[in-house]
Image (cartoon, grey):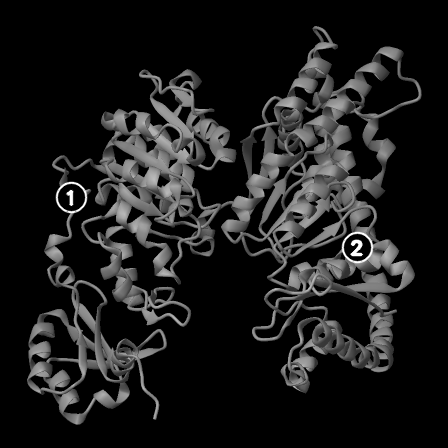
Amino acid sequence: MQFLNPKKQKFQQIQKQEFNFQLLDENRVFMTGTFTAFTDEVKQHIKQNNGSFQNLDGEKGWIIPIGNYQNLIMNLKSLQSEVMIKQLPQLLQKLQNLNMKEIKYFDNGQLVTLKYDNQIRYEQIDKTLEETLYEYQKDCIKQGLKFNGRILIADDMGVGKTVQSLALASMYKQNWPLLIMCPSPLRLNWQDEIIHWLKIHKTDIQLINCGREGIRMNAKIVVVSYDICAKIKDNLMSRKFQICIADECHYLKSPSSIRSQVCVPILRQCMQTILLTGTPALSKPKDLFNLLNIIRPDIFGNFKEFGYRYCDPKLSRFTKGIDFDGASNLKELYFLLRNYIMIRRQKKDVLSQLPEKRRVKVRIPGEASQVKQIGALLNQLGNIDIQQLINKDTIFQEQKDQSEQLLTINSILQKCYMLTGQAKIKAIKDYINTLFENEIKFLFFAHHQDVLDAVQEYCVQNEILYMRIDGNVGLEQRHLNVQMFQNNDEIRIAILSVTSANYGITLTAASTIVFGEMHWTPAIMMQAEDRAHRIGQVQCVDCHYLIGDGTLDDHIFNKIENKMNTVSNFIDGQKQNLGAIEFSAEEALVKGTSKPTLISDKGESILQDGNIQPSNQALTEDDIQEIYQLLETRSKEKQDQLDLEQAESQLKMNINKKKQVEISSQVKNQCSTLKQQLLDKYLSSNKAKKEIIEDKKEFNKIQKVIEENKQLTYGNLPQKLNYQYLQSRLNGDSKSTESGQKKLVLHFTKQQPSPNSEEEIIDQKVN
C-alpha cells in the first residue's frame, strides 16, 4: 500500500474536484473547473443565474454576470458537495475600491497613504511636445494620467517608451526633481533624450557617476544607474523624490536582490512612478509581482496571496515548499493589468503609425584609457577643424599624391578610428545584452575585427546563437549563414562586417540594426541599413547608432547624417524613366556646381536603375559623388544579386547531391561509431547502467542533430550536444573546412565527473 504525504494528498484532492472563478472585466466572471464537477444540478444553477457556456481563447467555461456571482456561490454551497470553490478575492468583488483617489499600504508595519486630489488633464501638455507624438503615444499619456502617474509602460522596443515616459513626467513638474533609474550603459542616452524632447539645458541634468557623488540641490533631473543606487541609498531616500522613472525595470523583478531591496522602497514612496520594460513576464507572473507591488501595493501587497492566485502553486519535487513558477487565472490578471497598472502595445499593433525606417542615436560611454589616447592624438592636430577634415571624402584613404601633412593627418585619424572601436567594446556588450534581455533579434555591424570578435566571444560565453559574415566567409558559407538567420528564430544576432556584408544579402528576419561602429562613407551605411529595410520586411526598421562619448563618433555621425539627408532627397521612392532622372540631377548640378559634366562622365549605365526625386536643393560636388557612389553600389548590388542567385541555384543542386552522398554513406555509418564511442566514454567514466543510453530512440536524436545541424538539449540523457557544435557550422572555419573536420563537443552532466569525462571532443569527418 502506498501512503501519501498529507499535504500532497490534500493538493491532489484539490486538483481533482474544484470550481474556479476569475474576473473578466467589471461586468463578467469566468467559471471553469473539473469536468466531472459540472453535474446537471450545477449547470441548472448556472443557467438560472444567466450563465452562458463559451470558448475564450481556447479555454472553455461559463460566463456569469457579476451581479449574479454571489447568488451562484450561495447556490453551489447549498449543494454540500466536496468540490472546492475558488472564489474571487474580496478586493476584486468591490471594484469601486480600486480607484486612484487614495492608495493605502503597509511599509515596515506602518500605514502609508498616498492621496491624489488634483487630477491633471491631458490638455495641459506642452503643445510643441505633443506635435511630435504619434496617436498611440498620446494614448499612453492619457492612460498614465488616468492612473495618476503610476504606470507600467510595457511597449515593445522601438515603440517609444522613452519619449512617452518623459512626456508623462513633464505633466507633473510640480513634483520635480525627477529621478531616473536605468542600466549604466543607458545613462548618457537618457541625457540626450531629455535634452531633445524636454528642451532642458544640460546643466539642469545631473548624471551620477560614482557612489561618492552627492545629489545637487538645483538639479531638475537626476539620472543614476541601478548599481550606483545601492551606494547612495541613504541620499536617495532622504531626498524623498516624488516622481521617478525606472527604465528596464525587469532588473527589479527579484525581491531578494540587493538592487530591488534598495530601489523598490524609493520607487514605492513616490507619488508618480513610471516603470518601463519591453519584456513583461506575462507568462510567468511570479516575475511580475515585485513590479506590480511598486505600482499598486494596495492591490498586490502580499506575494503569498498573489502566488496562490496567479502562479498555479504546486508542491515542489525538490524541496518541501511550494513551487510558484506556474501561471493561473491569467484572464483576471490581464484585466487588472490593463485597467489599473499597465499599458502594452506591440510593434505590429502600431505599425501603421510608424515610418518605414528610423535612426536612433544612442550615446554610450567610452573606456577612459582609449578616450585619453584619442584626445592626445587629436591634440597633435592643433587648431585644425576635425569635423571639416572628416567631412572630406578623401579622409581615411591613402592616395599616391598626398602631401606629408595629409599623410600624417590620415595616420592620426586612422589610429583614432581604431581606438574609437576599442573604447566602445565594453559598452557595446552591455547594450546588446539589453537587446537580448528584450528578446530582440537584430543585425550588428562593425568595421574592425577586434570589435566583431568581442561580440562573437560574448555570444559564445553566454551561449547565444549567432551567425557571422565578414571577409573571411566564403560564398557557400555566406549563403548558408543567411538562410539560417532568416529561418531560425533561435539565432538572435547576425554579426556583420560593415564593408563585407553591406550588399547582396537579405536579412529581413530582423527589424533592428545596431551599428557598433560606423563607416565614414554614408553610401556604405545606407546599404548596410538596406539589409533589413527591403522587400519582404513587414516591420518598421530601427537603426541604432552607438555613439561613443569622447571618441570620433560624433564627427563621423554628423557627416553621415548630413550626407544621408542630402542623398535621401534624391534617391528615394519608385523608379522613374531615365529622362526624368537625368533632368533632375542636371538641374541640381546646374544650381549647385560649375561642373555639370560629371553626369555625362558617369553615363547611363550608372543612372539606369537609380531612383532620383526632383529637388531644388543645391548640391556640392561631394554630394554628387556621394549620390553616384550609392547608385554605383546599388547597380553593382543588382548585378551581384543576379550572380548570387545563379550561384545559389547551382550551389543548392551541388549541396543536395553532396548531402545525399554524405548522409547516406558517411554520416549514418559514422553515427554508429559515434554511438559506441559515446557509450564507451560514458560507461567508463561514470559507471552508469548500460540501459540508460542504449535506447535506440535516444541515439536517433543524436543522429538527427548531426544530419540537420540543429541543437538539442536532452532532459534525462547524460549527454548534451553543446551549442558550440552548431557554431562551428555557422562560423565556417576555414581550417575546419580544409581538413574536413567538424567538432562535436560533448558535456557529461553526471555529478562528480572524473577529470577526463567532463569534456570529450570527438572529431568526425563529414566531407
Real-space CA distance between mark 2 and mark 1, rounded to the nearest whole angstrom: 69 Å
Residue, disc 2: 641
**Residue lying at 41% horizontally and 40% vertically, measured from the top left:** 247
Report the side of 542 relative to 575 (left or right): left
Does residue 356 show up?
A: no
Q: Quadrant of residue 526?
A: top right
Is residue 341 or residue 250 the one in the foreground? 250
Q: Position of residue 389 (x, y in %)?
A: 73, 17
Up/down of 533 relative to 663, above or below: above
Up/down of 194 relative to 743, above or below: above
- In which quadrant of the rendered image does the N terminus lie? bottom left
**Residue lying at 37% horizontally and 32% vertically, measured from the top left:** 180
Is residue 346 or residue 454 the one in the foreground? 454
Q: Position of residue 505 (x, y in %)?
A: 74, 53
Q: Residue furthest right?
A: 400
Q: Which mark identifies residue 700?
A: none
**Residue lying at 33% horizontally and 41% vertically, measured from the top left:** 261
Q: How many marks?
A: 2
Other-residue count near label 1 (Cα within 10 Å), few / some / many at <14 / 14–19 / ≥20: few
Q: Position of residue 151 (x, y in %)?
A: 29, 45
Residue, disc 1: 109
Is residue 327 or residue 212 the one in the foreground? 212
Of mark 2 and mark 1, the one earlier in the sequence is: 1
Give the secondary structure at mark 2.
Answer: helix
- Name the residue type under label 1: Gly
Q: Position of residue 493 (x, y in %)?
A: 63, 52
